[in-house]
Image: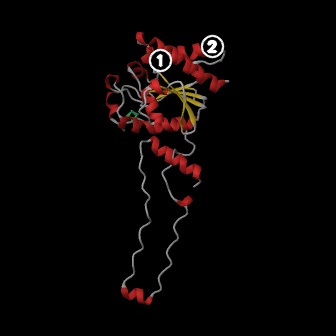
């Protein structure tokens, strides 16, 4: 295993919330009985396997695709969020996009339709993407980007997903991102930022600057549902600025 592969494994486990790893020693050889030991020369001990023979769970199945990930999720009941859902919301858009938006989880409209960001917040996101792109002279429409969420099932009463739900469902988000390998990710809101960056910092502090998920640049900005509140007009301007940065970085 190369140092780079090892780094990828460690980052993968960190993203899943695993912060402590233990090195397992090989089992000690069983000592031969006294009589046998007297008559038989000790057998040579097998050499410790070199690093590249150690077996670790795969980071993601080789040749992973969005289709395979969706099939593997199936009629998922891996966390309690399946109990109240109508439709599982996997993601939508261009699966080969250079830009992926990650939100928190489906709301009522998304849960009905099985598609991400189709309610009022979704319409605002579409306006933000297409409006900013058009102003900046970038020929981009919403179907050109990929949009998904940290959790694929609607949390009851639109509550924030619990850490264990984010961890369980997050493995699918990470596989989606690894399958697409975009040039940049835009994290919409604090939950997406927390899932991707493992930080407790709020959006206000994180937004406007580049961060990284693995080796992919991440811009954090406000969730569109936050921007719909009338008293958040300054945040709206900031979100537009953030988006401008993302679009120029990805499409210039
Ligand atoms: S939120 Fe994710 S892990 Fe939980 S049931 Fe839905 S698809 Fe499965």
Estimate the x, y position of residue 172 in percent, counting from the top left. Answer: 46, 37
Q: x and y percent of residue 249 in the render?
A: 63, 26
Tag 1's secondary structure?
helix
Q: Which residue is mark 2?
A: 134
* Residue that label 1 marks: 122
- Name the residue located 48 percent from the left edge and 34 percent from the top edge: 196
Q: Residues within 10 Å of mark 2 (few under 14, many from 20)?
A: few
Quadrant containing ligand 1:
top left
Q: Is residue 113 visible?
A: yes
Taking 58 as reference, is 27 left or right?
Answer: left
Residues at badges 2 and 1 in contact (C-beta under 8 Å)? no
Residue sitting at x 46%, y 11%: 233
Please rate how many residues cluster around mark 1, counting C-alpha atoms within 10 Å: few if below 14, some from 14 to 19, many from 20.
some
Residue nearest the viewer, comparing 242 with 112: 242
Closer-to-camera residue (252/122): 252
Dot in front, 2 or 1: 2
Q: Residue at x 41, y 86 (%)?
A: 37
Quarter of the image with the C terminus in it? top right
Question: Image quadrant for the N terminus?
Answer: bottom right
In three-dimensional space, the C-alpha distance between marks 2 and 1, rounded to whole angstroms, equals 18 Å
Say if 15 sits above or below 184 in the image: below
The answer to whether 130 appears left or right of 165 in the picture is right
Helix, strand or loop status at disc 2: helix
Of 217 and 152, which appears nearest the observer?
217
Where in the figure is residue 47, as x and y percent of width and height? 53, 70
Label 1 residue near ligand 1, CB within 8 Å: no
The correct choice, above or below, for 58 with respect to 80 in the image is below
Task: Tell which residue pokes out farthest to the front in this image.
Answer: 205
Does label 2 or label 1 sit earlier along the sequence?
A: 1
């Amino acid at each position: 295993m190369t140092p780079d592969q090892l780094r990828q494994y460690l980052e993968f486990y960190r993203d899943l919330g695993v912060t402590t790893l233990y090195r397992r020693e090989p089992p000690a050889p069983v000592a031969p009985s006294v009589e046998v030991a007297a008559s038989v020369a000790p057998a040579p001990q097998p050499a410790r396997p070199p690093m590249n023979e150690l077996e670790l769970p795969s980071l993601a199945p080789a040749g992973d695709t969005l289709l395979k990930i969706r099939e593997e999720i199936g009629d998922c009941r891996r966390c309690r969020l399946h109990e109240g859902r109508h439709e599982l919301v996997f993601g939508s858009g261009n699966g080969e996009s250079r830009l992926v938006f990650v939100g928190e989880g489906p709301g009522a409209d998304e849960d009905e339709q099985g598609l991400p960001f189709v309610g009022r917040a979704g319409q605002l996101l579409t306006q933000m993407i297409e409006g900013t792109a058009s102003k900046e002279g970038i020929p981009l429409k919403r179907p050109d980007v990929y949009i998904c969420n940290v959790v694929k099932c609607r949390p009851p009463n639109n509550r924030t997903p619990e850490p264990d739900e984010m961890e369980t469902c997050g493995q699918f988000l990470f596989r989606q991102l690894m399958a697409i390998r975009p040039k940049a990710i835009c994290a919409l809101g604090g939950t997406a930022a927390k899932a991707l960056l493992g930080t407790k910092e709020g959006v206000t502090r994180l937004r406007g600057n580049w961060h990284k998920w693995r080796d992919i640049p991440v811009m954090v900005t406000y969730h569109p549902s936050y921007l719909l509140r009338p008293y958040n007009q300054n945040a709206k301007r900031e979100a537009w600025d953030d988006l401008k940065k993302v679009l120029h970085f990805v499409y210039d």
